[in-house]
Each structure stands twice: as C-alpha cells, then as structure tokens.
Amino acid sequence: MHLPGALMVIAHRGSSGTAPENTIVAFRRAVEAGADWLELDVRRTADDELAVFHDRTLDRTTDGRGSIYRHTMEDLRKLDAGRWFSSRYTGVRIPTLTEVLESIPAGVGLNIEVKTDGDRHWRSRTARRLTEVLHTRRRGRPILVSSFNHSFLKRLHTIAPSIVLGALAMPLRDAGLRPSTFGRACGAKAFVCSRTSLRKRQVHDAHRHAMRVFVYGVNSARHLLRPRRFGVDGVITNYPALMLRLLDRTGRRPSLDMT
C-alpha cells in the first residue's frame, strides 16, 4: 500500500543532477541518498544487448559519435561516458541493464524506460531481449517498464503479461487523453507525465481505474507544489537527496504495490 501523503522518490537516470546520467555511479549515489526507485533508459545495440543510455546518438554524453544502434556493446564499453559531466568521472562507462540489475540492491525498484526511436526491431528483438533479461536477473525486485511507444507496451504485454507497464504521455500527441485510455489500450498500470502537463483530472481518472501517477521533471521545492497538491504517487527527479530533504523523509520508506 502507498502510505497516505507520502510520495515515492524516483531518481531520474540515477542521481543525474550530481553524477553522469545512466551510469552505475549515478545509480549508487541515488541509492545512498535513499531513493525508493531508480529510473533509467535502455536501447538495443547492434548485437541485441540492452545498453543503459538515453539518446539515440552517442555525441552528447560520450566521446563517441553516431547512432547507438550501429554499435555493439563491446564498442560502447570503450567509450567514456563520464568526462562530459565532470573530469572527476573520466573513465566511467555505459552499463548494460544486466549490470545495473546486478549492482543495485534488490529492494530498490527500477523504472525501465524503453527507447525505440530509430530501432527498426523494437517489436521483435527489443521486446524479447528485455523479457529474457528480466526473467533471469530481476531477483524479485519491483519493476515498471515504461515507454512513449505504446505499441511497444502492447506488444510486451502480449508476450509477458506479468510485467507491470507505465504509459508515458507525450505532451502534444497525447493531450486530452485520459490515463485510463492508455490502461485499456496497452495494459498500463501507471501513467507517467511531465510536471508541466500534469492535470488534477488525470490523477483522479488514474486513481479511479487503479492506476498510479508518476511525474517527471520535479527538481525543486516549487516543482513539488502541484504534484503534492494533486496527490500523485511519485516524483521523478534529478536530485533525489534534495527531494527527500524537502519531503522530510526521515521515517520508513513508502511502498508501492504495482501488482
């Protein structure tokens, strides 16, 4: 059960405000801060591995170039994924989803956002590979698989109905649609939207249909005002330590049953 008045604190790409995003060091820092869950992004590589990486191209956060889909995981391991953030993180590497699952305590939940833009094989290879990894490496931890690609979620629900899904709402494409619409369309149990697009009616609709609501882009005290007032279930933040201080989270963690 979700504790009344308590918000889940979900670390966006780890503690990405204080360490290079989507890296083991960022995830460990978030765990040390007390984050309830971690959010991360995965993309399929040329050799069907699942790399924990946000962008479609390597340029912004590594010393590599070009599309991630043209590289094998062996290629990606050679890249520096930390120096762009700070010289103190020089040598930090891109991890695989398996490596994250093995590195983070089993009691910490994972919100795995699947990126499919540019991936020609998301319907077959990506969905199958994700189910394989979760089947062998999950270790009983809470898992939510989310995506902006609701067709992918529907496909995943077909081949692995036990995996809990979260529908990410795109501000323009999905404007005006109710969370329950996504629940019926792809089997989603959670609705995920941006802080700026959050509406109270969305929270009411989701909760009436036994769906949870998570809001991303919550990085300051001001950002917390509407999510708390509207009664959302969790906030996704670049600064989990700050959020926990602002929420005065000194007692036991709230829990969230996503089954």
Image: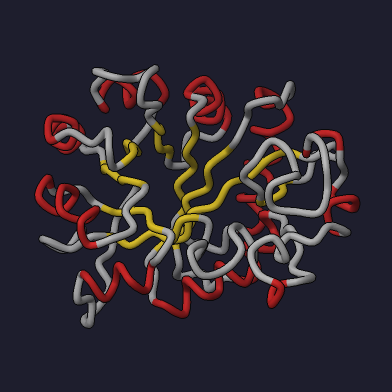
For residue 222, side relative to residue 74 (left or right):
left
Horizontally, residue 194 falls left or right of residue 29, namely: left
Classify 116 as above or below 239: above
Across and down, in percent, residue 190 comes to: 33, 39
Total count of labels: 0
Q: On the rendered structure, is 161 left or right of 95?
A: left
Q: Quadrant of residue 24?
A: bottom right
**Front one among 117 and 49:** 117
Q: Residue drawn at (39%, 17%), measured in percent from left and top?
A: 173
Establish if 60 lies above or below 247. Answer: above
Q: Residue at x 37, y 66 (%)?
A: 36
Q: Quadrant of residue 121?
A: top right
Q: Quadrant of the N terminus?
A: bottom left
Residue 28 coordinates in the image, percent (x, y)? 55, 74
Q: State the residue at coordinates (65%, 23%).
A: 123
* Between 162 and 129, the one nearer to me in the picture: 129
Residue 6 percent coordinates (x, y):
18, 63
Residue at image coords 72%, 59%? 95
Image x and y of residue 12, in percent: 46, 56
Q: How is the image coloured?
A: secondary structure
